[in-house]
Image: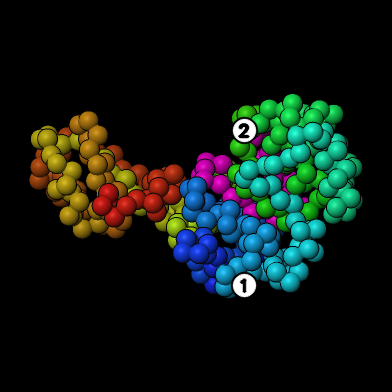
Amino acid sequence: MTTAIATHELTKRYGEARGVEALDLEVPAGEVFGFLGPNGAGKSTTIRTLLDFQHPTSGTAEVLGMDSVAQSVEIRERVGYLPGDVHLFDHMTGQAHLDWFERARGSHDPTLVASLVERFEISLDRRVEDLSKGNRQKVGLLLAFAHRPELLILDEPTSGLDPLVQAEFDQLLREAVAEGRTVLLSSHSLDEVQRVADRVAIIRDGRLVVTNTVEQLRADAPRIMSVRLSARTDPARFRVVDGVVAATGREDWIDLRLDGDLRPALRLALEIGLDDLTARHADLDELFLGYYQDDEAR
């Protein structure tokens, strides 16, 4: 199997409200796939539809080569899922949760469970209601990984975790991929995704806007040129220049976002009077935010 997840024109609407629209998503097997977008963009809607917690309005989805609706029970047995809002039973301990999940979906890997409990310092003998948000999140991660699933679908998995635990989590993802498993990592944090992802998809208002490798996204990123001019200048003068997609003022500097030839903007800066200049490619945070800029701000 070369593809872990494949959707075709997948659409989910809530009455007149949009969930996701005509989504064509392909997640290759054996890699960490980052699924990026701000809250409300459609990430969780996509995941809930893939796992058949809700039926699609139209379109289709396959998970591990199986139809997301007709074979949903088998899919959920082979997938490890961590929702963005982990809901556990307050009166039950972590161990009780492990036992319940094992009866529901099949055997856990005891060696893996013991390793994760030690690595993440998970409290299995305390009731959930007595755990902090971070420790509840650790129990949720343990439940997702415990049966060594072929596919892990993780929605905002590091919410509430401290930086040291996040680093251990990143290592855990690398180990899963090294074993041939697949991870769909959904997040609104580019920093979280770019640390571990091989490929990234960005969703905006329920539609995919780009899918590519992290390396190619970096290579295709627009350039940022910052100019310090000898005369105070309204950044709006640069916004009408060919190749300039955004221009903003910052103290004595004007920051230009360029997609194409930088020479027209440079000529204008020289004409006004150029005192200093820096240029670089946009980093992935800037690239991500660029997909969400309003037309008015461009």
Q: Position of residue 23 (x, y in %)?
A: 53, 67
Residue that badge 1 annotates: 60
At 80% across and 58% down in the image, what residue appears? 77
Question: What amino acid type is highlighted by mark number 1?
Answer: Thr
Q: Position of residue 196 (x, y in %)?
A: 61, 46
Q: Main secondary structure of the magenta part?
A: helix
At 15% across and 44% down in the image, what residue appears? 269
- Name which quarter of the figure residue 228 lies in: top left
The quarter in which the N terminus is drawn is: bottom right
Camera-nearest residue between 218 and 2: 2
Question: Is 88 drawn above or below residue 124 in the view shown?
Answer: below
Q: Are marks 1 and 2 in contact (CB under 8 Å)?
A: no
> Which region shows up in magenta?
165-192
User: Label 1, label 2: how many angstroms apart (C-alpha)?
Assistant: 34 Å
Residue 12 magenta: no
Camera-nearest residue between 76 and 267: 76
Question: What amino acid type is highlighted by mark number 2?
Answer: Gly
Q: Position of residue 32 (x, y in %)?
A: 64, 52
Mark 1: few, some, or many residues within 10 Å (few <14, many ≥20)? many
Q: Position of residue 85 (x, y in %)?
A: 63, 43
The answer to whether residue 208 of the structure is visible from this angle is: no
Coloring basis for residues: rainbow
Q: Is residue 170 left or right of residue 149?
A: left
Question: Is 4 drawn above or below residue 190 in the view shown?
Answer: below
Q: Is residue 98 left or right of residue 138?
A: right
Label 1: which secondary element: strand
Residue that badge 2 annotates: 160
